[in-house]
Image (cartoon, coloured by chain):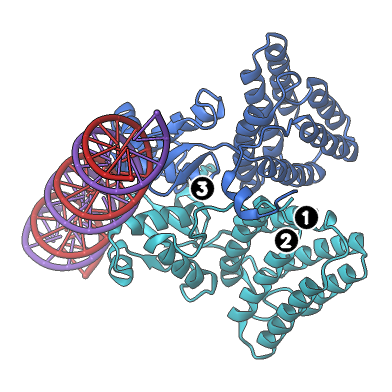
Chain colours: A cyan, B blue, C purple, D red
DNA sequence: GCGCGCCAGTTTGTATACAATTTACCACCC
DNA sequence: GGGTGGTAAATTGTATACAAACTGGCGCGC
């Protein structure tokens, strides 16, 4: 059942400079070193990575498709600033995908995987205690990705990976400073339930977990989209 | 001041010639006028749409991200030929997303929407009777997209739209000539359950519906992936 | 005759040049 | 003085040019 697709003899190590640039930019955004709203001028990236604007544009287009970057016509690219609506949608979608995947997870889960997941939880816990909010967000995302990947569905895993990366931006924009991410105990609880083979309970817990995250967001209003307000056209007294 | 032009950020109205070309190519692939495996040389597309290869590549890259086109380094693009594994993954993922969306659909569904869905079913039914397999596949996809869109989750709807387009290629490649798509009665049954407010029954029926589709695929005739066969080194006797 | 290697033709990958649009700044007018 | 309009600088959009890689065919040697 494993869908391994041997691309070319040189597997995934290569991919060219554009792939290297993609990884760099993706990591920088996922790890919030480039916060939401940061402008990404093409010539700067071009000079930074030593490639032509052609490749820069290619990478930016790709990341725009993934929702990590916003490209406005003739106005360049910037790190995406997810709206409140988008935040709700992303987490609702993640809940469906991740709960669905969890519900069909073949049991028992290999011990090695359980151990790796526990290790991620431990690191996330450390980050929380150290007040390293950014690291906690990233590690929480890694946990969810790894968990989703257990099902062996590469298509689903890819989607979850993309949604998790967007979630990172969402938490940076709308997350409250305290208890930004999932409470560590919740992640640990899911693992424990999985280890005991109580899959259905794990699914229920996961759903509640997403509920907590969504509720934890603070919906501080966005930059007040003047256009849509005016076009909304409520009758002027 | 010429600010009267509704230039919304996520412009769906216009985006230039590249957007027009995207729509054209997407429709051609979705409607199977360009069957899986069809090569898509850049200069041909360039001449066809009257744009430079730059824009052609931009569109092809985008469609590759969506899984509709495969781009192999230095070897150009072609309409994707989904593998059997990919087919299973796509339908499993769709089941999770679409069942999840259905389970949370606010009831009652507006009458106009129900009517539009019934109309799609009717057209699909016609196509089936007329032996127009290609139209039936497309209309079936339209039905699923419209149903998913009812929830109002744009992020989820976009994912479903992409997966449905890929499903079109999957059915073209692996679908059996008869009963290619969903049996029409199944779609109608889902609408009826929805109209009566029996959401849970609808979800269950939808899940079974995907089960039927997956089972209806014929898995013979794998593309003879010589590389992985040789490298896999199973050497079965 | 069969196989190997070389060469030409074709196709893609990347960079650069030029056009179009936006942005910012400053002079100008009310 | 504040707002308006225009012009210049900067940035992006598109096209083209050139380099690299692959494909297919032909000739040569075994």
On screen, residue B28 above or below C7: above
Q: Residues within 10 Å of mark 3 (few under 14, many from 20)?
A: some
Residue name at image x 78 percent, y 77 percent: A115
Q: Secondary structure at mark 2?
A: helix
On screen, residue B163 above or below A94: above
Q: Is residue B2 visible?
A: no
Q: Nearer the viewer, residue B11 or B174?
A: B174
Query: Based on the displayed image, in which of its 4 quarters is residue B168 positioned?
Result: top right
Q: Return the mark for residue B65.
A: 3
Q: Return the mark for residue A148.
A: 2
Residue situated furthest bottom in the rendering: A130
**Chain bearing mark 2:** A
Disc 3 and disc 1 in contact, CB within 8 angstroms: no
**Chain bearing mark 1:** A
Distance CA(mark 2)–CA(mark 1): 6 Å
Residue name at image x 77 percent, y 35 percent: B214
Q: Is residue A16 visible?
A: yes
Give coordinates of residue B157: x percent, y percent. Answer: 64, 42
Disc 2 and disc 1 in contact, CB within 8 angstroms: yes
**Chain bearing mark 3:** B
Q: Nearer the viewer, residue A145 or D20?
A: D20
C17 to the left or right of D28? left
Residue name at image x 35 percent, y 59 percent: A56
Give coordinates of residue A61: x percent, y percent. Answer: 42, 53
Disc 2 and disc 3 in contact, CB within 8 angstroms: no
Q: Nearer the viewer, residue D26 or B25?
A: D26
Residue situated furthest top in the rendering: B130
Distance CA(mark 2)–CA(mark 3): 20 Å
Residue name at image x 52 percent, y 59 percent: A11
Which residue position holds label 1? A101
């Amino acid at each position: 059942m494993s869908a391994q697709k041997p691309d070319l003899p040189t597997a995934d190590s290569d991919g060219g400079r554009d792939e290297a640039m993609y990884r760099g930019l993706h990591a920088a955004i996922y790890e919030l070193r480039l916060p939401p709203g940061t402008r990404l001028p093409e010539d700067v990236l071009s000079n930074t990575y030593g490639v032509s604007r052609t490749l820069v544009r290619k990478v930016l287009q790709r990341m725009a498709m993934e929702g990590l970057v916003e490209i406005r016509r003739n106005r360049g690219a910037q790190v995406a600033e997810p709206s409140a609506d988008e935040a709700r949608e992303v987490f609702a979608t993640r809940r469906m995908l991740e709960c669905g995947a969890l519900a069909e997870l073949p049991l028992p889960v290999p011990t090695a995987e359980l151990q790796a997941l526990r290790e991620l939880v431990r690191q996330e816990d450390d980050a929380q205690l150290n007040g390293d909010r950014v690291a906690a967000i990233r590690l929480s995302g890694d946990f969810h990705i790894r968990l989703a990947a257990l099902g062996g569905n590469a298509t689903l895993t890819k989607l979850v990976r993309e949604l998790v990366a967007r979630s990172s931006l969402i938490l940076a924009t709308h997350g409250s400073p305290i208890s930004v991410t999932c409470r560590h105990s919740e992640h640990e609880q899911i693992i424990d339930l999985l280890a005991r083979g109580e899959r259905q309970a794990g699914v229920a817990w996961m759903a509640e977990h997403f509920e907590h995250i969504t509720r934890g967001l603070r919906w501080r209003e966005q930059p007040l989209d003047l256009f849509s307000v005016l076009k909304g056209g409520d009758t002027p007294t």
